[in-house]
Image (spheres, helix red, strand yellow):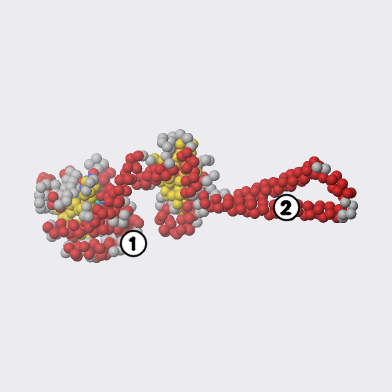
Amino acid sequence: MSRAPDEGILKEAGAEVRSSVNWRGGLLLILVSAAAMTVSARYHLFLRLGDFARSHRELPTEQMFSVLIVSAVLGFVLVVRRSRALSRELRLRREAEDRIRVMALHDPLTGLANRRKMHEALVQAVASRRGAALLMLDLDRFKPINDLHGHGVGDKVLKAVADRLIEVVRDGELVARMGGDEFAVLLTDIDSPEVAARPARRILQALEQPFQIDQLECQIGGTIGVASTCNEKLDPETLVHRADVALYRAKREGRGQFRFFEEEMDRQVRTRARLELEFRHAVAQGQVAPYYQPLVELATGQVRGFEVLARWLHPTDGMIMPDVFIPIAEDTGLIGEMTLSLLRQACIDAQGWPADTMLSLNISPVQLRDKLLPDRLLGVLAAHGFSPNRLEVEITENALVSDFAAAKEILSVLKSHGVQIALDDFGTGYSTLHHLRELPFDKLKIDRSFILSLDENEDSRKIVDAIISLGHSLGLTTIAEGVEDLQSAERLAELGCEMAQGYWFGVPKPEAYGALGAASVAPPTAATLAFAETRRARSSAR
Ligand code: C2E
Ligand code: CA
Ligand code: CA
């Protein structure tokens, strides 16, 4: 019901039109003949003609009647032929109109209904007294297939997806391709939004099965946002907007699932849209500031450096944390500018630090596609007379997955200028031993999730132990994040971890030396000294 009728169906429709036109022509002929006979009988036309011939014997009446009859027959034949030609023209026009209508309402690639047809169906659905639900579906991992294997393969995948959707939807459910890799399914005549959960699950399961395209096995999947009119009357635009909002949320929470729209999501989307607009000025106006968290050497308690953590000091909303605005910075393309602005401010702040104190800067995965990144960073360092040997960049494992070759090139250039490279959040992403061997890392940062659960989770302890051993065997320094208490710090030191960072040593602060846990102005801090003291006491007692 949601696919375009094919050529065969169109031909059948044409034949139907043609036969109905012929049938009508025949009927018209019989009616005209019957009417002529009736008129002749009613007014005794033939008798009168006989009378006329008898009273005008001087005229060639026989010939006149013959001419009259032949003309009538000829006229009749002409009318029949003209009506045939007209009906043919009519049929062709109807066929063309049918085709145009089909094209205007269907997606030429997949044959599914298009956005316009879905809109028409939505207008009807929201006008109905019963409820409707709209499922907005976005394909997962489609873009890499398109990029890697070309649009030909991409098109075949989209067609195969359309086939699967047609297979899993029920009668009366409309499937449409809304554009790109976005599809929609409309359920009508439903009483509660929960009814949509079942088709949503069916669709996701169907898309999880691999697609065999030529010699290629493609593993894609889908994410769905659902909105319905069961509990309130909505116009089609609002219904689509809500399904989009739910889809956006589902994608952010981890693809491969479906989410129902909630009012709260709408508020968050609006806030994000506002922040996105405001962020454009925030960087230029210096509202994004560096906060510093100390990086501590466990053996001595010495502060070896500071990690720069960005804070958006918003004029009305107060302090906004990076997990809110870094995605905005990435999406708006302002992340590069923001990083350089942070580095400039940090270089100025670092002028008052001990000369060997390191500065650790987070680099987002999207920045590793910018070939000019090394030049830009080194340019800022040069402008402030800050040695590249004192800069460390932190990249996450996921940055290596999207374009390993580009990441390798950028990191190698930085490394050749003396910049150190740390692999951040280690243990949570997708990096492989191959990445560790191929890239010029200096440091592994053990993700804080393992450290925070070090005490209560035996597995975390084993993982941390394994990461430290791995780091040592590859000649890398290991640093643990999220150290919140003395006990964890001690444990890490015993496991051979060289460095640590966390609230116990110092929370991120706008002034580096204000970041230290105790009110010390120079390293080591009271907290780190206490730690070093405990360790010394322990080892002399053994
Ligand atoms: P990250 O690089 O893993 O940074 C460490 C995060 O852990 C920081 O969160 C820090 O405040 C927090 N943290 C430090 N010690 C502890 C602790 O003892 N316990 C707990 N529970 N947390 C601790 P923050 O500042 O909110 O930053 C979050 C993430 O935002 C960072 O994670 C980083 O991925 C990103 N980020 C921050 N600044 C920047 C930046 O300038 N550029 C980029 N690209 N990303 C940034
Ligand atoms: Ca970091
Ligand atoms: Ca981290």
**Secondary structure category for the residue under label 2:** helix
Question: Would you place residue 263 above or below residue 297 in this image?
Answer: above
Q: Is residue 295 left or right of residue 334?
A: left
Quick check: marks 1 and 2 in contact, CB under 8 Å?
no
Q: Position of residue 97 (x, y in %)?
A: 58, 52
- Asked if residue 225 shows in the view, the reply is no
Cα–Cα span, label 1 and label 2: 78 Å
The quadrant in which the C terminus is found is top left
**The one of 480 and 111 positioned closer to us in this rendering:** 111
Residue drawn 31% across and 54% down? 332
> Which amino acid is tagged 1?
Ala
- Asked if residue 343 shows in the view, the reply is yes
**The one of 11 and 156 positioned closer to us in this rendering:** 11
Residue drawn 37% across and 45% down? 245
**The one of 415 and 115 positioned closer to us in this rendering:** 115
Q: Which mark is residue 6?
A: none
Residue at the disc numbered 2: 79
Question: Would you place residue 341 above or below residue 204 in this image?
Answer: below
Q: Is mark 1 within 8 Å of ligand 1?
A: no
- Mark 1 vs mark 2: in front: 2
Residue drawn 46% across and 36% down? 131
Residue drawn 86% across and 48% down? 52
Residue at the disc numbered 1: 405
